[in-house]
Image (cartoon, rainbow, N blue to C red):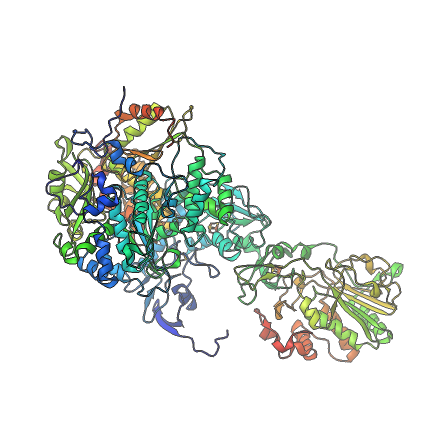
Amino acid sequence: MSEVRFRNPGWAGNTGEFDLNEADVRGTGYVGERALDGGHPSVSPSLPYMFVKKDPDAPLFEGPYRERFDKIRSRYPTARAALLPALNLAQELRGHISPETMDEVAGLLGLSDAYVRGVATFYTMYNKRPVGRFLIQVCTNISCNLCGADEVLAAFLEHTGTELGQTSSDGNFTVVEAECLAACGFPTCVQINSRYFEDVSADDVPAVLDRLKRELNRSF
Amino acid sequence: MADNGRKAETVTLTIDGREVTVPKGTSLLHAAESVGTEVPHYCYHPGLTAPAQCRICLVEVEGAPKLQPSCVTMAADGQVVHTDSPAAKRMRQGVLEFYLVNHPLDCPICDMSGECKLQDYVFDEGRERGRGREPKRVFGRDDFGGDVLYYGDRCVMCTRCVRFMDEVARDSRLTVVERGSRAVIDTFFDRGLEGASFAGNVVDICPVGALVSKDFLHKARAWDLDHTPSICPNCSHGCNIELHTRDNLVQRLKPRENQEVNGHWMCDYGRANYEWLNRPGRLEAPATGRGSDRRTADWKEALELLFGRLAAAEGDVALVGSARCSNEALAGLGALGDEMRGRTAQRVFRAPRAADEVPLPGFPLLVRRRDLVPNAHGAGLLGFQRCGDDGGEGGLDEVAAHGEVIIVLGDDLADQDGDFGANASLFVYLGTFESAAAGNADFVLPITTFAEEDGSFVNAQERVQRFQQGLRPPESARPAWLVLGALVAALRGEKTPDSAPEAFARLVAAHPAFEGLSWEAVGDAGVALGAEAAHG
Amino acid sequence: MAYPYRHDKETRVLSECFGDPAARTVAGWKAVGGYGGIARALEIGREATIEDVKASGLRGRGGAGFPTGLKWSFMPKTAARPHYLLCNADESEPGTFKDREIIRWTPHQLIEGCLVGSYAIGASHCYIYLRGEFFETTNVLARALEEAYAEGLVGSDILGSGVDIDITLHVGAGAYICGEETGLMSSLEGRRGEPRIKPPFPAAVGAFGMPSTINNVETLAAAAHIARHGGEWYRQWGTERSPGTKLFCVSGHVNKPGNYEFPLGFPLMELIEDVCGGIPAGNALKAVIPGGSSVPIMDAADCRGCTLCYEGVEAAGSMLGCASVIVMDETSDIVKQVRRMAHFYAHESCGQCTPCREGTTWATRILQRIEDGRGTEDDLDTLVQISEQMTGTTICVLSDSLAMPIISSIEKFREDYLALIRRGERVGAA
Ligand SMILES: Cc1cc2nc3c(=O)[nH]c(=O)nc-3n(C[C@H](O)[C@H](O)[C@H](O)COP(=O)(O)O)c2cc1C
Ligand code: SF4
Ligand code: SF4
Ligand code: SF4
Ligand code: FES
Ligand code: FES
């Protein structure tokens, strides 16, 4: 069985000194499930998830999402300020930001369509095209790069059988290059959907991908 | 400019060794301008906010740790500024070089060539070409809709166009898409500028050839165009404009700055409607006689004959003017009516009216007015009454059937038929184009359009504004003020006015609404009529 | 305790609870004295709190090192208009990974810091701007903030004081430039994250046009401790000009990279060789970038004797920045790494300023050509000149941030460039 050793935080070649489990490190036990309606208004703009299932036709801002949107709006003095949270929410639901999504969000906030396009294209996290169920973002910036990030990136491309930025034929994986993810002490850092995988070496890549395949049914 | 009697605070500084005193709050860029130094600038435009992003306007201010962007650095007392020090020059050259890294330098096929600020600045201070060896970025051409084309490779990313649409048109249809060197200007995918009311201004303010007019595309080279100060003839706001002409044809209209009227801007409707000035089918020569008796005559002969008929005419007079005519022409027509023996029974004009006004939200003084003619207010002040419908038609039934004297000035009578004036004892038609309704005219006299003469209009703000002659008229056409002025003078036994200013002076003397005005005072910027001169 | 980045020499103020999941809760944070800082601040009042922070000599940990107490004192004293505190949790400077660590292990440390800062500057609303990639980190902070609201620590009438302070989490969407203070404000307002020209300064016209103060996560976390213990207490560590402790993010070629907390003034070589267990495989040190990628590169000679405080690193020819120590050993390919940095800045330039927009891309392409073995010696001069033209000529300092590593690398590692240019030889593999 190919189990990925969870080494974060750790260093290349875990010496075993480290006895926290993954949930401790990620804080998932403490966080638990976050409410889709955003929970307390103070944290409502902070809840984008990157889901495995992406439904480009999902209705925007209905049910709990509507509640979340209303809470978000209540935290800012202007409607414009709710734009990034609204786009984040839209991407959480649909997986990418299409022109139609931009248009809908613009209408909702009373902004011009072109303005929303300008903002959406400024930020690299808005996928302008659909991406795979898992978006794999490999940091190749300096600290990771010094420690072999290029090989890690190559390994992800090889083992998913994709070209940079393209989605694998089964729709599972899209591999892209990322800028520094603020985990430079744990190279190479790879962001996969909402999670960071740290201390990833090229050799670890098959096991990471196996784990993801097993997780195709998880929500995020 | 009114300073409300308060003494404006000033600051005194030194620019390139010369001391200057400017009002507090003046930018270094403007302060330098006041001593005749143009500091290069792209992103700064006086009608827009200043993001200070192009960095081409950097100047040295003694004591400041870095070069300062002169567009947003305010003049202060005792400042010592160098626009041309080695540091400032080196930096500006550097910035220019950056522009050239990706600029296609396709000046030979660029519509902006000759009035391009990149060309100018590179010529003034740049290295002829940069040291860039890398292949250039290519974006290609994009149709922005409306009259606007975008050539991304020429764009210097000054964002003037985006800011115009955001801040002035308040119609945010343009945006910067992407970031860094991948950034371009774009609209929302297929949706563009079509149907916008003021978008044409983005072409004017684009400092390079990135935004160009489809209408003007490859039509003329900038250096071949003559520029004539004028007034937009397409609504009663009277935006100050320039006629750009070549080969005796208007090639385009461009706004001319006037902060009291139109700022730096004009509307798309006004901008697009100039072809009528170039229209063929102009009246070729004076003519006399009705129907089959019609024959051409020379001016002297025609006027002598007409003078005789006018002097002898007894009956009531119907005057039809046009709000496309100058004040001088309309005043001449009115005066002619007054000099005749008969009573002036009708003194009317017709003008098309749009359903709505179209204001420019970020410069609220500018409104595309409902009256789609330049001088409805002048006509009113000079005693003409509007008649007809909002299409500028109808309302002339009484005149058409009038049995005595009819004089028509500048109205094409396009909606009238061959019976017009059939009963008139004398029917005089002064016009620019052939008209089917002029068949019964005893005299057909070709006059010039406003583009072919000097004159003035009164706009909807009650402001008198002058325009200048930009086109050569057809050989035999004469300004209406001259034709009418000659007839009035002959009836009165005085000298014919020999110029538009003279015609204006006579108008002022005759019409209290214009009291106190002089041609010089009106100048290129115009003057508002006194409040007491409001027309009734 | 199981947190691996530990060394006996450390002085743990901010990092005391790293690795202890229990400290994530309000109860856990209170158990180590947490929320004592805001309690004391409320007791001694705004002015006294600012005075404490001034006295502590705390300098901004976001990179510029501006004295925090002084920055707070720029805010208008009257609250005619809303004031905002903006917490900069956009951490994206390559080599820097301390703020994430603070937030995910001790979210209440940050929340308390935000309360102290907000109270001191008279802000009733604080926005924490988190980089969009921090999904997991943000979730921890969100849960902690919900808890703090529930406990009456945040919101109206905090701790029964009658003071109202709201905190809102705001997440970005992938743009390094949103870590620049005015870029952050643009982004928070729902705009493209484009920095703005100063003046006006944020304390006069900041977020939403209102007086605003912006502070880094670590700065605010430290302020929470200073509020609890007083300014003089903080000065027991560090140097006269760089008081207190600091998290050092060590990455690159060391055996034990990670976050280590020391008083400012700690010797660089001791950090690398002793604390971080030296360089793998006994390789020799080649270069260090001491403050995140935006500062000049130091060669091994510069590192000897260098102490890690603002003035110490300056004396060694570079800048402390956010104390992100990137270690490069003899296997490092300087040209490749500088090209990678240039690529980063070109990718992250917002594109407003011509020297930055064009310069970062142009420099990247020249560096790429050199790396591909098609460079010329003239290219090095061109690179230096481009870099000079990018220095001090733009709205923000992102442009200068690339210029510094380029100029310093060409100065210190010219041979590496020349080896590629003249002989097509790559120096180093990493
Ligand atoms: C391009 C650029 C990126 C920056 N990124 C960050 C950042 O990610 N986090 C941060 O705290 N400060 C960042 N800064 C510094 C901030 O502009 C600002 O100085 C800092 O947040 C102020 O907080 P402090 O006084 O507490 O350090 C950046 C500056 C620049 C020019
Ligand atoms: S298109 Fe013209 S006005 Fe618009 S940003 Fe480009 S250069 Fe400036
Ligand atoms: S507003 Fe009127 S005067 Fe001005 S450009 Fe338009 S049509 Fe011409
Ligand atoms: S220096 Fe670069 S990142 Fe900063 S404002 Fe200018 S273009 Fe944007
Ligand atoms: S360099 Fe890879 S996470 Fe920072
Ligand atoms: S004109 Fe001053 S920076 Fe652009």
Q: Where is residue C331? Give x, y as percent.
A: 19, 33
Horizontal side of B191 relative to B479 (left or right) equals: left
Is residue C115 among what the camera can see?
yes
Please tell me in which quadrant of the rendered image residue B450 appears: bottom right
Horizontal side of B10 relative to A14 (left or right) equals: right
Quarter of the image that includes the N terminus of chain C? top left
Q: Residue furthest top?
A: A1
| C4 w.r.t. C46: above or below | above
Q: Nearer the viewer, residue A162 or A14?
A: A14
Q: Nearer the viewer, residue B269 or C292?
A: C292
Numbered-mark total: 0
Is residue C296 among what the camera can see?
no
Residue drawn 42% across and 37% down? A92
Please tell me in which quadrant of the rendered image residue C48 appears: bottom left
| B90 w.r.t. A49: above or below | below
Horizontal side of A71 relative to B536 (left or right) equals: left
